[in-house]
Image (cartoon, helix red, strand yellow):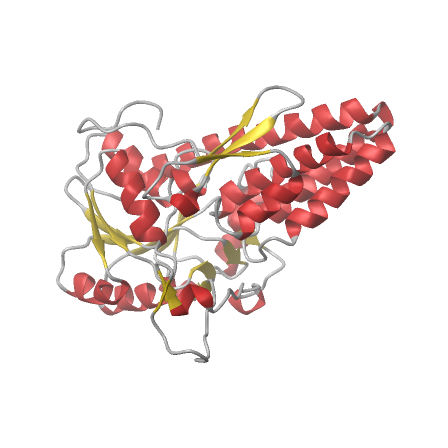
Amino acid sequence: MTDRARGGGIAPVRTIEWEGDLPGTVRLLDQAALPAEERYLRIETAEEMRDAIRRLAVRGAPAIGVAAAFGVVLGVQSARARDGEGALAAANAAADLLAAARPTALAPFRLLGRMRGRARAEAPRGADAVLRGLLEEAMQAVEEDRRCCEAIGEAGAALLRDGDAILTHCNAGALATASSGTALAIVYRAAREGKRIRVFADETRPLLQGARLTAWELARAGIEVSLLADAAAASLLRNGTVAAVLVGADRIARNGDVANKVGTYPLALASEAHAIPFYVAAPLETIDLEAATGEAIPIESRGAEEVVLLGGRRVAPEGVKVFNPAFDVTPARLVSALVTEAGVLPHPDEASVTALLAGAHRPRRG
């Protein structure tokens, strides 16, 4: 969203930006510091970018993809290769490093593949051509993300009516992209159209992305937001307050199964139980045709400290075992519609998902 939101709010925050020409740096909003502090990091190396991704200073599939692309540029820039082959080797090494940061989101892997391909194509022209080509490719990805978010917002806003309240989980807004978001782009677009939309944001344990990020982002943009504990979501759906559940996705299988932040699956079950539409907003690049079902999607497991500590204070006994998946898989049968830059796909299944990809004008990200 480029102009002020209704109600006096301001445009969504810029999560990640390239600064300068070459050599340059990446300006990155440190999401691990929110909401207490709006702090920006200056990232200068591929290693620093990998660490920022791992510790969730940047998160959300599209934003991680852009961060990884910029990380490859930084890796080649730091290597100061003398020829094209040396620059290509540096690009591949940086891509390998960044690909290992987090496994579930598909967008970073697709974009890293593009960066490798661009480096390979430019290598015969020398090291400078590789570096400039990589920066151009990364900046193109930023522009594609902007257009994609706008298209998702436009398509999804038609699903919301004036006065609707929606429930969301984790953060699929500007903080998760290089633009206005996926799920929250729909909210921003609806607000621009004059619709009064209220948002209920799950706190999203264990790392509280809903409390720390979504509530902060929406309040900053002038959108009415209420925070609730994850365990209260089913009761909210039962009482008829919410018109729809609206979430993002990190990877979508060929049959329409959706991997998103852990806690999404129970929301889908509760939505089905109370006949509430359950919408998933995500770019086409999120669809993984090589994953026949959600069972084939790799699910990241994270450290026990995220569960046994809260605000740095231990809230569980020493030695207790912990189950801490970062994501869960929602079966396609529970998804009312996928909202992509190509439009709204009701009740996705393998036939409709593959047809969508075959018929859509795919962005160059893949």
**Residue 188 in the image, given as x and y percentages of width and height:** 29, 35
Q: Can you say whether 329 is above or below 218 in the image?
A: below
Picture coordinates of residue 334 (x, y %)? 36, 64
At x 87% / y 28%, what residue is drawn?
Answer: 83
Relative to 62, residue 325 above or below: below
Q: Residue furthest top?
A: 21
Q: Please give the name of the residue rendered at 19% of the width and 35% of the height, measured from the top-left corner.
A: 195
Q: Position of residue 207 (x, y in %)?
A: 39, 58
Give the quarter of the figure containing the N terminus.
top left
Q: Is residue 40 visible?
A: yes
Q: In this rendering, would 87 be left or right of 186?
A: right
Q: Quadrant of residue 169?
A: bottom left
Q: Residue 195, relative to residue 323: is it above or below? A: above
The residue that appears at 39% across and 46% down in the rendered structure is 172
Give 257 or 43, whichever is nearer the viewer: 43
User: Looking at the rendering, which quadrant does residue 124 occupy?
Assistant: top right
